[in-house]
Image (spheres, helix red, strand yellow):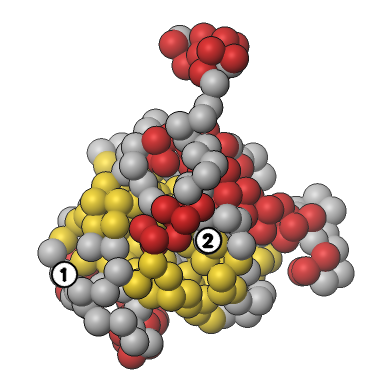
Amino acid sequence: MPDASSAVKRLAAVAGHFGRDLERSVVKISGIIDDARRSGVDLLVLPDAALGGYLGDLRHPDVASLPPALTVDAPELREIATLAGEMVVCVGYTEQDGDHRYNAAICLSGDGILGRHRKVHQPAGESLAYAAGDTFSAFDTPVGRMGLMIDYDKTFPEAARSLALDGAHVLACLSAWPASVTDRAARLPQDRQSRLFDLYDCARAAENQVVLVSSNQTGIMGDLRFLGQAKVVGPGGDILARTAAKGGLAIAEIDVEGEIGRARRVLRHLQERRLDAYPGLNAELRR
């Protein structure tokens, strides 16, 4: 087990089922944090909507039975920060801010809030349940500079790229990623969304030469069947640890800065972009 001063860190992604009961979720998260601490974990990434659960219908969400919403200073979040102690813990929840509800993620330790994110990209009918965020920002933590994404965000290369350009070396992507709702396979590993979930994780890590820690819900919520497949991906796009469709912890021990330095020793994707060759993209960004 690496000591606190070591460059080697243990990063863990959670696959697990989390429902509407906030008290039960906090108890479950407490147990997961305890297990992670016994395993020497430095960064623990819980799924999207680990507090309060996700939607039960992605195309036509029932606005009368949405997940419970918390303010950023809610006692449940303060309790998780206390439980985290020296560990860095990322958790997904529904954030209430005035009249708006956001699908949100927060990064906590015993020192308080380290970083926050509101999901920017909304699939299908999610906009009927949540307002959209509008930014991606990296932040400093004891395990290095990090960025947050929430499930569908990782479908868009610009999301991870903007965080990498902001100096993030670790991307935490918290998901409630279901199997296909239009073309379901008999077995989860054969599902089209299962393949895409893994593809996006590996591609976002490799194209930005960063470490990606990808969590996901498991089980069933309403009409949705979640994939699991939590993983830690290295800066070359290689999967260092993963779970299957059932709950569990994917734990990888890695020298983040050392491995990123190794990946960027010859090829430096961020520096070697040709911005002059993307006039259409540049014009779009200036709008």
Side (left or right) of 202 relative to 287: right
Instruction: Identify the mark nearer the N-term, 1 or 2.
Output: 1
Q: Quadrant of the C terminus?
A: top left
Q: Disc 1 to disc 2, how far (Cα)?
A: 27 Å
Give the residue type that dot 1 points to. Gly
- Image point (63%, 79%), residue name: 246
Residue shown at 30%/51% (left/top)? 145
Left/right placement of residue 234 relative to residue 90 reads right
Q: Which residue is mark 2?
A: 234
* Label annotation for residue 277: none
Measuring 84% from the left and 53% from the top, which residue is drawn there? 183
Q: Which x, y percent locates residue 3?
A: 25, 82
Q: Which residue is mark 1?
A: 110
Q: Is residue 194 above or below residue 127?
A: below
x, y percentage for residue 253? 43, 75
Task: Between label 1 and label 2, give the one nearer the viewer.
Answer: 2
- Of 271 and 160, nearer the camera is 271
For the point 56% across and 80% down, the residue is 247
Q: Would residue 189 be visible to someone looking at this image? A: yes
